[in-house]
Amino acid sequence: MIVTTSDLFKVAYGKFAVGAYNINNMEQALGLFEGHMKAQAPFIIQISKGARRYAGVKMLENIIRAAEEMYPEAIFAVHLDHGDEQTCYDCVDSGFYSSVMIDASHEPFEENIAITRRVVEYAHAKGVSVEAELGQLGGVEEDIAVDEKDARLTDPDEAKEFVERTGCDSLAVAIGTSHGAYKFKGNQRIYLERLEEIQKRLPGFPLVMHGSSSVPREEVERINAAGGALDPSARGVDPREFAKAVPLGVTKVNIDTDGRLVWMRVHREHFRDHPENFDFRKPGKAFIEAYADFIVEKSRYLLSYGQLETVRQALQQAPASH
Ligand code: G3H
Ligand code: 13P
Ligand code: ZN
């Protein structure tokens, strides 16, 4: 069942984080639903502009609709990841999305506010909630390359002003993470103390952690042992940090890269071990199963494992909101 992102956040705030996973194809969708059913956890499906271009808007929407029918017990929201203004409007108009992210974080503060405010007005009029971003993550986001030197953490006072002036429903904050497999070099780290300062100024307001993949060392080693060429120094977020971020207001944790690593490991090992195979269903099936196991493990760290019934009951009691 597709629900509103706000409804998930109301149940989750302070208790668990909802995992938000990007999908591009059927295999990811099947693994995602299978894993969340095993974990009895609610979740968010994220669609990026790149995914919309890759699979096609209709194809993605119908994959999700099909999965919804196949897994009638699943409770999830559908979210646009890192949208620009026009893509936000397109997604709101489609009537399919629970929420959209307007990412104008690369713009100056006032311009970010103006763009976000426009999207909020448009989306709220149609019952869709809005995630915005303030501060800049390092690494690469969609088409925007942010030089790591310029990456800056979210300013807590600005965060309060930004939320008040835009009316956004959740805020992606920069607390030291970045997208991709190479998050931390040298003494780089995650700044939970910054999160605490933001929460003090925005109590009860849902915060979002982007760039939350863990890039497990053993996964990188297995990929490289099967012919991959990832930098062995690749490092991500220690997943035990999620449990510390939850009481500080993080209700949504974005994970994409780790799923790509599962895909890469399964396929590389499969073709290394079965060089004669040309049936894509064999590694495809292995990936779906491995991805489902991966989801179960993530949901334990996010504390969303086993929360499905709590969410179901809360939804039955409260009228839907955007
Ligand atoms: O933050 C971006 C997500 O990892 C999605 O990546 O734009 O390549 O689909 P993508
Ligand atoms: P990762 O690259 O750490 O998986 O982050 C994904 C993300 O933030 C999507 O918006
Ligand atoms: Zn992101």
Image (cartoon, rainbow, N blue to C red):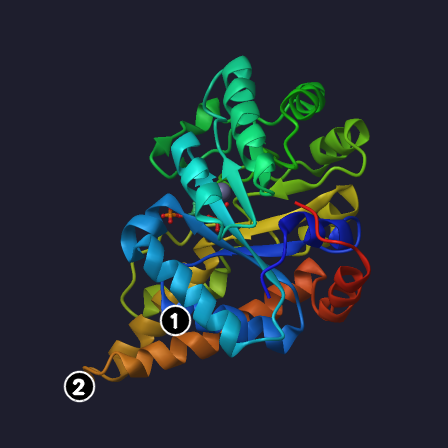
Vertical relation: 89 (above or below) 257: above
Residue 253 x, y percent position in the rendering:
60, 50
The three-letter code of the residue at mark 2 reads Glu
Contact check, label 2 and label 1, Cβ < 8 Å: no
Dot 2 crowding, Cα within 10 Å, few <14, some 14–19, many 20+: few
User: In percent of the image, x 34 and y 77: which residue is there?
Assistant: 284
- Neighbour tally class for label 1: few under 14, some 14-19, many 20 plus, Cα within 10 Å: some
Q: Quadrant of the C terminus?
A: top right
- Amino acid type indicated by mark 1: Glu
Above or below, comparing residue 90 to residue 301 in the picture: above
User: Residue 233, position in %: x, y?
Assistant: 43, 50
Q: Which mark is residue 276?
A: 2
- Quarter of the image with the N terminus is bottom right
Query: Sequence-wise, which precedes: disc 2 or disc 1?
Result: 1
| Residue 274 appears in the figure | yes
Q: Residue at x 67, y 61 (%)?
A: 301
- Out of 241 and 155, give the one closest to the viewer: 155
Mark 1 sits on what residue? 27
How far apart marks 2 and 1 lie (CA) works out to: 22 Å
Residue 260: image tag:
none
Side of 17 relative to 62 (left or right): right
x 55%, y 36%: residue: 123
Circle 1 SS class: helix
- Describe residue 209's horizontal placement relative to residue 108 as left or right: right
Q: Quadrant of residue 270?
A: bottom left
Report the residue at 47% width, 46% height from top: 80
Of residues 183 and 141, the one nearer the viewer is 141
